[in-house]
Image: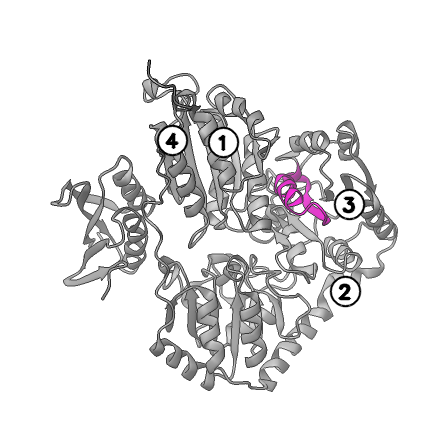
């Protein structure tokens, strides 16, 4: 009789491979095709599965883990509808370059392509929004595919990778040896900055009178904040952040002009409009950043440092295109940059700052009486002051997002999380769960509007079940505020499809065992926020705000910077 | 009617299910029309050669699609994906990862 070899099930081999990649949390929802993997979980206590209430939330929660830890987050769902429900979260991760690994069950290989029950061609659907996709048709491939998936998700420009696991592969029993987990095609590092490029950059920097440095998401993702800061402080150049670059450097830095782009600060956008040199670090000149491309920063030379060559010269032509990782390129540029006072240039920025501060409704509306609702900007500024700008802030998508980006002073590295590229409403609550699991000792705030809150409100169930301690700041104006603002400005104030009849949010939270309170006047704002901070466990603060409040300034989509509007 | 330029891309990739789909999905996403397409084996086992011609009104976005295709094919053709592309009458040759 042949000697019995040790055997292993495909699903167990899969879980073991996840453990090898250091996975702790999996956010997911079970179902027919993925059941074998769930069945194997008890044998791997290192894997902690968090059951969400909708698969889309699983993908956003995985993003929360990835954004907060810098390592891939994991979500898991069954075939068919489970897989398609993940799609929004995966597309979101793709546009924001967030490393997540999505695991989906699939029908058995024998019936793939026959329109079997709960079959969907999820790979076919996800190819345009994933970095790489795998369908496992051989159980021996499991260790290598899992290893490659995590490697690719987190290497170079980060992004989502999907592994589709057919049920018969998960159920297959094979001898437990002889696996080859070698990565087949290692990603090559970018060539880096060349001597000619350093010299060219040096010439441009030396002759520039009005430079501005752009700090993008890449600075956070590559951990180059120290190098970038040294460059900035040696050169004394002013800098501005993209939406995702916020929190890369302290918000109270004296050289910081604020966020750029559509809802950026007056000082940053006026500086960009008048700059003679732009040094763009780890960003991609998205249309919300540039407005009308033909008119964008016409007088400026552009030094663009990017590790994805397809982003260089895509929207804005670079005078010095540098296809390189950030750290080494910034270090080389720091060596050759000189210090200049830029007195006139900073005076110009200060003048624009004073101009805006003079007309900013948040500065003037500090003493709104009891009869008036608090302004959204006031609420965020109060939160920023109370938390010293040091808490984690997870925002949803809409006016509240822009207010959070502008009025919260992020003083701690990588504490600002939101959906920028895809702009997915419903992002904040599930993403905050992922952030909280990654940073259990830190306070995590959700800033959300009444529309966005209801797009993944079912996750209050997950928060209840798992006792997830997140503080939800709901800015409720009973409207889809950002769309309303556009209707007001560009569609003759015809408010179609934007008024919202809302439930009693406090009662709803209470049904999930979550405490909360409603604030309608500014004087009750601070005590409510303090109670939320003190409370052990999740807490909802609903703030009733005005429907006609607008986030200003605004550069209308596709417009020139000189078309910036500062009042309605 | 606008004169459409014809661009031809020659790419090498691993002979696996889904690679061609990935390339075409990128071309489709950008709303280019495929005029001709030829895929066959090369003398290297497991490596396919794809010749794709597509038409497009303006030439300024070609550079990006070539870079994006390079990202896909470089994954597959080990570390020496070599790609040629023809833009108007000029011929460019790029080496990905190969030593110069």
| Mark drawn on residue A131 | none
Quadrant housing the N terminus of chain A:
top left
| Mark drawn on residue A543 | 3
- Of callouts 4 and 2, the N-terminal one: 4
Q: Which residues are magenta?
A: A428-453
- Of callouts 1 and 2, the N-terminal one: 1
Do the numbered discs 3 and 1 sit on residues whose CB atoms are within 8 Å?
no
Q: Residue at label 4?
A: A177
Do the numbered discs 1 and 2 sit on residues whose CB atoms are within 8 Å?
no
| Helix, strand or loop under label 3 | strand
Label 3 – label 2 distance at C-alpha: 19 Å
Label 1 – label 2 distance at C-alpha: 54 Å
Task: Determine the chain carrying the residue at label 3.
Answer: A
Q: Residue at label 1?
A: A15
- Of callouts 4 and 3, the N-terminal one: 4
Residue drawn at point x = 73 percent, y = 34 percent: A467
Task: Determine the chain carrying the residue at label 1.
Answer: A
Camera-nearest label, 1 or 2: 1
Residue drawn at point x = 67 percent, y = 51 percent: A393
Is A439 one of the magenta-colored residues? Answer: yes
Label 3 – label 1 distance at C-alpha: 44 Å
Is residue A47 positioned above or below A131 on the image?
A: above
């Amino acid at each position: 009789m042949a000697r019995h070899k040790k055997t292993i099930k495909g699903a167990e081999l899969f879980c073991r491979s996840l453990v090898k990649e250091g996975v702790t949390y999996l956010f997911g929802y079970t179902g027919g095709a993925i059941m074998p993997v769930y069945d194997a979980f008890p044998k791997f206590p290192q894997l902690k599965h968090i059951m969400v209430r909708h698969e889309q939330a699983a993908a956003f929660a995985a993003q929360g883990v990835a954004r907060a830890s810098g390592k891939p987050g994991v979500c898991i769902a069954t075939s068919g509808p489970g897989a398609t429900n993940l799609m929004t979260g995966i597309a979101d991760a793709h546009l924001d370059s967030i490393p997540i690994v999505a695991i989906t069950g699939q029908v058995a290989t024998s019936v793939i392509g026959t329109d079997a029950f709960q079959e969907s061609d999820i790979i076919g659907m996800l190819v345009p929004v994933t970095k790489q996709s795998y369908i496992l048709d051989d159980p021996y491939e499991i260790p290598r595919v899992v290893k490659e998936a995590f490697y690719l998700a987190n290497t170079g420009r980060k992004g989502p990778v999907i592994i589709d696991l057919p049920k018969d592969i998960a159920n297959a029993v094979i001898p437990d040896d002889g696996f080859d987990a070698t990565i087949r095609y290692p990603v090559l590092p970018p060539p880096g900055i060349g001597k000619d490029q350093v010299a060219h950059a040096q010439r441009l920097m030396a002759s520039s009178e009005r430079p501005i440095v752009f700090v993008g998401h890449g600075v956070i993702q590559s951990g180059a904040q120290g190098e970038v800061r040294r460059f900035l402080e040696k050169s004394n150049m002013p800098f501005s952040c993209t939406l995702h670059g916020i929190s890369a450097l302290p918000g109270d830095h004296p050289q910081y002009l604020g966020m750029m782009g559509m809802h950026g600060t007056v000082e940053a956008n006026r500086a960009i409009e008048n700059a003679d040199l732009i040094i763009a670090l780890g960003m991609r000149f998205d249309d919300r950043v540039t407005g009308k491309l033909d008119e964008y920063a016409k007088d400026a030379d552009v030094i663009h440092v990017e590790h994805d060559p397809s982003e260089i010269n895509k929207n804005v032509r670079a005078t010095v295109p540098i296809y390189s990782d950030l750290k080494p390129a910034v270090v080389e540029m720091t060596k050759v940059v000189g210090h200049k006072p830029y007195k006139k240039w900073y005076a110009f920025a200060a003048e624009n700052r004073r101009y805006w501060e003079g007309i900013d409704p948040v500065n003037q509306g500090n003493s709104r009486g009891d009869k008036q609702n608090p302004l959204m900007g006031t609420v965020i500024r109060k939160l920023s002051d109370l938390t010293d700008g040091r808490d984690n802030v997870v925002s949803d998508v809409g006016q509240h997002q822009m207010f959070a980006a502008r009025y919260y002073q992020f003083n701690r590295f990588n504490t600002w999380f939101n959906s920028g590229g895809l702009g997915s409403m419903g992002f904040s609550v599930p993403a905050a769960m992922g952030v909280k699991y990654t940073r259990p000792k830190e306070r995590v705030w959700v800033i959300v509007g009444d529309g966005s809150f209801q797009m993944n409100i079912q996750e209050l169930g997950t928060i209840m079940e798992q006792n997830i301690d997140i503080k939800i700041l709901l800015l409720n104006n009973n409207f889809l505020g950002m769309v309303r603002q556009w209707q007001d400005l560009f569609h003759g104030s015809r408010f179609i499809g934007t008024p919202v009849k809302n439930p009693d949010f406090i009662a709803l939270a209470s049904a999930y065992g979550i405490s909360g309170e409603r604030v309608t006047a500014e004087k009750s704002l601070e005590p409510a926020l303090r109670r939320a901070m003190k409370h052990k466990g999740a807490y909802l603060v609903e703030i009733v705000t005005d429907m006609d409040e607008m986030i200003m300034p605004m550069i209308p989509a596709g417009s020139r910077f000189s078309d910036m509007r500062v009042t309605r | 009617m606008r004169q459409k330029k014809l661009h031809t891309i020659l790419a090498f990739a691993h002979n696996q299910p889904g690679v061609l789909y990935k390339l075409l999905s990128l071309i489709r996403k950008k709303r280019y029309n495929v005029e001709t397409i030829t895929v066959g084996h090369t003398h290297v086992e497991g490596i396919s050669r794809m010749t794709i011609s597509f038409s497009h009104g303006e030439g300024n976005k070609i550079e990006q699609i070539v870079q994006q295709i390079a990202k896909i094919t470089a994954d597959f053709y080990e570390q020496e994906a070599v790609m040629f592309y023809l833009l108007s009458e000029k011929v460019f040759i790029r080496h990905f990862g190969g030593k110069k």
